Structures are given as C-alpha cells and as structure tokens.
Image (cartoon, rainbow, N blue to C red):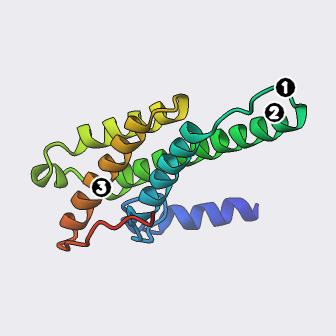
Amino acid sequence: MLYSAILSIFKKLPAQKALAHCDGPCGVYDPASARVAAEAVLSMTKKLLALQPPEGSDPSAWTTYNNTFSRFVAVKEEQAQETKKELLILWTDYFKPEHLDAFPALHDTFWKAAKLCSACKVNVDQGKAEELLASVEQIHNMFWTSKGRSDTWKTAS
C-alpha cells in the first residue's frame, strides 16, 4: 500500500532531465593514466626481450627465470588491458560527435590503439609496444587540443 502511494506521487512529479557525458558525471578525464599504462607495457616488453634463460639445468635457476618471465608477462598483459580500458573511457565517454570535425581520424586512431593493446597482450613485440605509446601520444594531443590546451607530452621513463 505504501509502495503504491509513493509510486503514484512519483508518477505525478515532473522528472528533471539529467545530463551527463558518462556513467558518472564527474568531468574528470586525462589521458595520463593511459600513458603510464602504455609505458609499462613497453618497459615490460623490453625486460622480456632482454631476459636471458639460464644455461644448464639448475632447477633453482630455471625456477627463478620462469618466475621472472611469468611476472613480466603478467604485468605486460595487465597494463595493456589497463591502457585499453583508459582509452575506451576517453573514446566513449569524453569525445563527442562534435570532436569529429576537429579530429576526423579520431575513431580510427582509437580503434587502432585498442587493437595495439590486444597485440601487446598476445605478443612480445617491442615495435607494437612503441606503436601503442605513439598512439597514446596522438590521443593525448587530440584530448588537450579539444580542451583548448597544449599540454606537453612527457613520459615517466
């Protein structure tokens, strides 16, 4: 009975139109988190390529090698996924149709960057990791230009 009364009151009240550009209307966006994650992908890729397997059959040395290798792979894949997540948030929540006028290659740039995230997860390819970081830089430049700023691209590593 109480439920019916409350429901009838809500039906009579005019609903206000809610405006939000994403799931949470905080308005806080920054491609820096994608940059940091992409840098980690590149760093882990370089570490994997530099990692040398032990000579011989010492079980302890092989255990250490396998542990290090698997940790580097796990971090690389985790950070590639994090890069993709951060890029998709920018693409789907921040950028609007009106941004396409200023950045006609916006969709293609994001799509290719997301594909590079996947390539970095399934391969140990320094070239792909460097391409990913370069794509994130392009997105960084589009983002800050869209805000009327020209924040300098700086990497942490």
| Lower position in the chain sequence, tag 2 or tag 1 | 1
The residue beneath circle 2 is 62
Task: Give coordinates of residue 157: x percent, y percent.
Answer: 45, 63
Q: Badge 3: few (under 14), some or many (20 or more) residues near its Cα, within 10 Å? A: many
Q: Nearer the viewer, mark 3 or mark 1?
A: 1
Give the total of numbered labels.
3
The residue beneath circle 1 is 57
Identified by mark 3, the residue type is Glu
User: Does residue 2 sit above or below 118 in this rendering?
Assistant: below
User: Does residue 94 sit above or below 41 in this rendering?
Assistant: below
The residue beneath circle 3 is 137
Q: Between marks 3 and 1, how big is the CA–CA gap?
A: 44 Å
| Residue 81 visible, this angle | no
Q: Quadrant of residue 22?
A: bottom left
* Cβ atoms under marks 2 and 3 closer than 8 Å: no
Q: Which residue is found at the position 47% from the left and 60% from the top?
A: 36
* Cβ atoms under marks 2 and 1 closer than 8 Å: yes
Please name whichever residue, 34 or 100, is drawn nearer the observer in this view of the structure: 34
Q: Badge 1: few (under 14), some or many (20 or more) residues near its Cα, within 10 Å? A: few
Instruction: Tell me: 153 left or right of 63.
Output: left
Q: Nearer the viewer, mark 2 or mark 3?
A: 2
Task: Give coordinates of residue 115: x percent, y percent.
Answer: 39, 33
Please name whichever residue, 82 or 50, is drawn nearer the observer in this view of the structure: 50
Q: Which residue is found at the position 33% from the left and 41% from the top?
A: 131
